[in-house]
C-alpha cells in the first residue's frame, strides 16, 4: 500500500528544509511558522502551504519588499504582488518550479499573538510570541 500522505508531505518537508536557512540568516525575520488545520482535520487537496513570517514594525516594509529575492535565492518560484492580509499583514501567492503552492504571509511581530489561529507548527521564534498564538483550550 502506498503512503499517500507521506508522499505528499515529502515535497513540503524538502521545501521547508531549503527555505529555513534563509529565515535563520535574516535577522529582520523574528519568527517563522506553518499554519494549518488542527490535528485530525482532513487535509485539503491542492491547498497551499501556509507559511508565515513575522517582522518588526521598523523593517516590516523592507522585509515585504525583499522576501521574493531572499526566498528566490534558495528556490525557483513565481511570486504574486503582495496583497493585504489580516491584521495589516501582506501575503504573496507563490508557486515553486515543482508546482508546490505557498501562501507566504508577512505579519507584524507586535500583532502575532493578537490574531486567532487554527493550528501552528513553529519553525523559528526569536520573540517567544508564538506560544500566545495557540489556543490551548483545544
Image: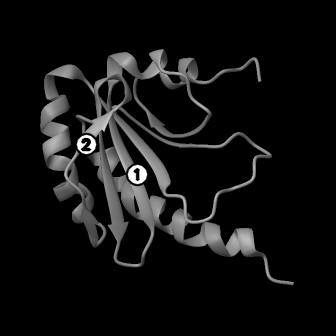
Q: Is residue 73 above or below residue 2?
A: above
In the picture, the quarter occupied by the N terminus is: bottom right
Q: Position of residue 114 (x, y in %)?
A: 46, 15
The residue tagged 2 is 83
In the picture, the quarter occupied by the C terminus is: top right
In the figure, residue 99 lies in which quadrant? Answer: bottom left
Say which residue appears at 24% left-offset and 57% top-offset: 80
Q: 4 or 74, which lies in front?
A: 4
Q: CA distance from mark 1 to mark 2?
A: 11 Å
Q: Is residue 27 left or right of residue 13?
A: left
Q: Position of residue 73 (x, y in %)?
A: 22, 65
Q: Position of residue 87 (x, y in %)?
A: 35, 23
In the figure, residue 116 lies in which quadrant? Answer: top right
Q: Position of residue 133 (x, y in %)?
A: 54, 22
Q: In the orientation shown, which residue stands out farthest toward the bottom?
A: 1
Mark 1 in CB contact with mark 2 (< 8 angstroms): no
Q: Is label 1 or label 2 in front?
A: 2
SS for dot 2: strand
Q: How many marks?
A: 2
Say which residue appears at 33% left-offset and 60% top-offset: 94
Q: 99 or 62, which lies in front?
A: 99
SS for dot 1: strand
The residue tagged 1 is 103
Say which residue appears at 37% left-offset and 18% top-offset: 111
Q: Is residue 34 above or below residue 115?
A: below
The answer to which of marks 1 and 2 sits earlier in the sequence is 2
| Local crowd size for mark 1, using a 10 Å CA cut-off: few (<14), some (14–19), many (≥20) | some
| Local crowd size for mark 2, using a 10 Å CA cut-off: few (<14), some (14–19), many (≥20) | few
Q: Is residue 138 above or below residue 82?
A: above
Picture colour scheme: one colour
Amino acid at each position: 500500500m502506498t503512503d499517500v500522505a507521506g508522499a505528499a508531505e515529502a515535497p513540503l518537508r524538502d521545501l521547508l528544509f531549503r527555505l529555513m536557512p534563509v529565515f535563520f540568516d535574516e535577522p529582520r525575520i523574528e519568527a517563522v511558522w506553518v499554519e494549518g488545520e488542527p490535528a485530525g482535520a482532513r487535509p485539503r487537496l491542492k491547498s497551499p502551504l501556509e507559511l508565515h513570517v513575522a517582522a518588526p514594525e521598523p523593517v516590516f516594509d523592507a522585509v515585504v519588499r525583499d522576501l521574493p529575492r531572499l526566498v528566490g535565492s534558495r528556490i525557483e518560484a513565481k511570486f504574486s504582488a503582495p496583497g493585504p492580509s489580516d491584521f495589516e499583514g501582506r501575503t504573496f501567492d507563490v508557486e515553486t518550479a515543482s508546482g508546490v503552492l505557498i501562501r507566504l504571509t508577512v505579519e507584524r511581530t507586535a500583532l502575532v499573538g493578537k490574531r486567532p489561529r487554527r493550528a501552528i507548527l513553529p519553525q523559528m521564534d526569536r520573540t517567544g510570541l508564538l506560544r500566545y498564538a495557540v489556543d490551548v483550550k483545544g
